[in-house]
Image (cartoon, coloured by chain):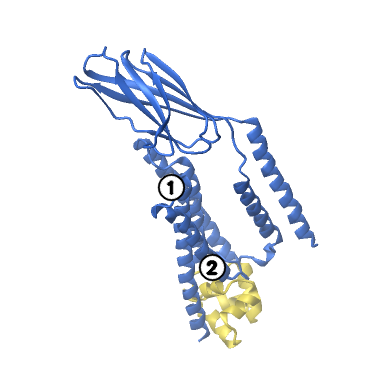
């Protein structure tokens, strides 16, 4: 399932996938795979993404 | 001098010294190289003469002096002439020896100026007149012994240079710069497992084919090297498809150029054979596999590079 909330949060900060990847310490393809729903990140990476985007885990990754 | 560079230099010198010493000690301790073969052939004696199918046997001896120990088991009445040609089977014979078939014919054939040239041994059976027309079986036991193992300085120097280069690259490259993220590590693990399965399948297929086909034309050496090369290429391609071949700060351009160059170089070497400029042997056979693998990798890297650029451009827009 696509993670549109992550994409929106990134776009709101005017960050490219590469910018976020550099900030988190992963490859651009990994961010792309998470946004497309092709890869389920570990909790460690989720936390790093949340910190980089200033969001909580619930806001970015919790699914109702 | 940096600590790492100094360590690399010392390590290189130690490893190269060990390689040269090992090669030298092996030459000193084992001055002979031996080859042994055994085969059967049938001979038909008719009223008009003798019919047989014995192709010349090819040898690539190491060293200058070569001794062949020939033993022929067969019926009394068949004498066999063993003829050695140098260079090609059609050239003038350099040694001829008659082996009398008295149950167990035996002869030693000495070639004194082989010096790494190709040798061809041909057997010509003759009916001494005492045998009735029928089909007879001859068993040949052939043992070749060459006098020395030479320490070739050229290949040894190339090996030493490659070792020094390899050690320098490994030690001086800052490995922490080529980190992989968690997705890449998982993808690499999966690719490594699949590559191992491919290597095992290559070896299994070779085992089945060599058992079911007599005189299967591919040697164990070629299969060993070939399987590793095919497995490594499969690993690299699978990793790159999943964007896990290059680390976070690595660029593909250098490796892409290297793959094309390696592919061309290996195929050029192997291609000489098909142009009639070389002889097809284990080295050119392996070179062909290396060339094809590097070409496949280079093509995959080029295609992936184009897709990657398009994806990045789409994401930006």
Specify the label residue B257 is tagged with: 2
Across and down, in percent, residue B195 comes to: 49, 53
Q: Is residue B236 depicted above or below B250 in this figure?
A: above
Nearest to the observer: residue A17 or residue B200 = B200
Residue lying at 48% horizontally and 48% vertically, measured from the top left: B283
Answer with the quarter of the image where residue B146 lies: top right
Q: Chain of mark 1?
A: B
> Which residue sits furthest front?
B92
In the rendered image, the vertical position of residue B189 relative to residue B116, given as above or below: below
Between B308 and B269, which is closer to the camera in this rendering?
B269
Q: Please identify the quadrant where the N terminus of chain B is shown.
A: bottom right
Position of B191 with respect to B138 (left or right) is right
Label 2 lies in what chain? B
Q: Residue B14 location, x and y as percent?
A: 73, 47
Secondary structure, mark 1, is loop
Q: Nearer the viewer, mark 1 or mark 2?
A: 1
Chain letter, colour yellow in render: A
Q: Which mark is residue B279?
A: 1
Q: Residue at 52% of width from left, 38% of height from top?
A: B116
In the rendering, at what x and y percent does residue B272 appear? 43, 55
Does residue B167 lie above or below B106 as drawn?
below
For the point 40% across and 16% down, which residue is it?
Answer: B105
* Residue sitting nearer the eye, A18 or B310: B310
Quadrant in the rendering for residue B270: bottom left
Instruction: Residue B250 in the image: state x and y as whole percent.
Output: 61, 69
**Residue B256, numbered circle:** none
């Amino acid at each position: 399932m696509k993670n549109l909330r992550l994409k929106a949060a990134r776009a709101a900060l005017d960050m490219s996938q590469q910018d976020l990847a550099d900030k988190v310490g992963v490859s651009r393809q990994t961010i792309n795979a998470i946004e497309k729903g092709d890869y389920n990140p570990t909790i460690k990476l989720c936390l790093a993404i949340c910190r980089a985007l200033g969001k909580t885990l619930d806001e970015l990754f919790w699914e109702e | 001098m940096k600590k790492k560079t100094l360590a690399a230099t010392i390590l290189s010198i130690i490893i190269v010294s060990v390689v040269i010493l090992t090669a030298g000690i092996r030459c000193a301790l084992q001055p002979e190289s031996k080859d042994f073969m055994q085969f059967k052939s049938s001979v038909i004696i008719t009223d008009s003469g003798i019919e047989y199918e014995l192709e010349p046997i090819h040898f690539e001896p190491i060293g200058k002096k070569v001794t062949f120990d020939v033993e022929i088991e067969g019926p009394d009445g068949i004498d066999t002439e063993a003829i050695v040609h140098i260079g090609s089977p059609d050239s003038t014979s350099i040694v001829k020896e008659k082996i009398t078939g008295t149950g167990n014919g035996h002869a030693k054939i000495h070639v004194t100026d082989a010096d790494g040239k190709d040798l061809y041994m041909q057997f010509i059976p003759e009916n001494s007149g005492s045998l009735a027309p029928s089909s007879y079986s001859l068993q040949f036991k052939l043992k070749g012994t060459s006098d020395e193992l030479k320490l070739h300085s050229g290949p040894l120097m190339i090996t030493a240079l490659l070792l020094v280069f390899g050690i320098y690259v490994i030690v001086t490259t800052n490995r922490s710069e080529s980190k992989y993220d968690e997705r890449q590590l998982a993808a690499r693990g999966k690719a490594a497992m699949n590559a191992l399965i491919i290597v095992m399948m290559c070896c299994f297929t070779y085992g089945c084919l060599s058992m079911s086909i007599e005189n299967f034309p591919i040697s164990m050496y070629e299969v060993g090297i070939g399987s590793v090369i095919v497995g490594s290429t499969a690993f690299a391609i699978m990793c790159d498809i999943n964007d896990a071949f290059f680390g976070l700060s690595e660029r593909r351009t250098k490796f892409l150029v290297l793959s094309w160059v390696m592919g061309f170089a290996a195929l050029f070497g192997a291609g000489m054979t098909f142009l009639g400029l070389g002889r097809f042997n284990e080295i050119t056979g392996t070179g062909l596999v290396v060339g094809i693998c590097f070409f496949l990798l280079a093509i995959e890297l080029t295609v992936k590079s184009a897709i990657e650029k398009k994806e990045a451009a789409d994401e930006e827009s």
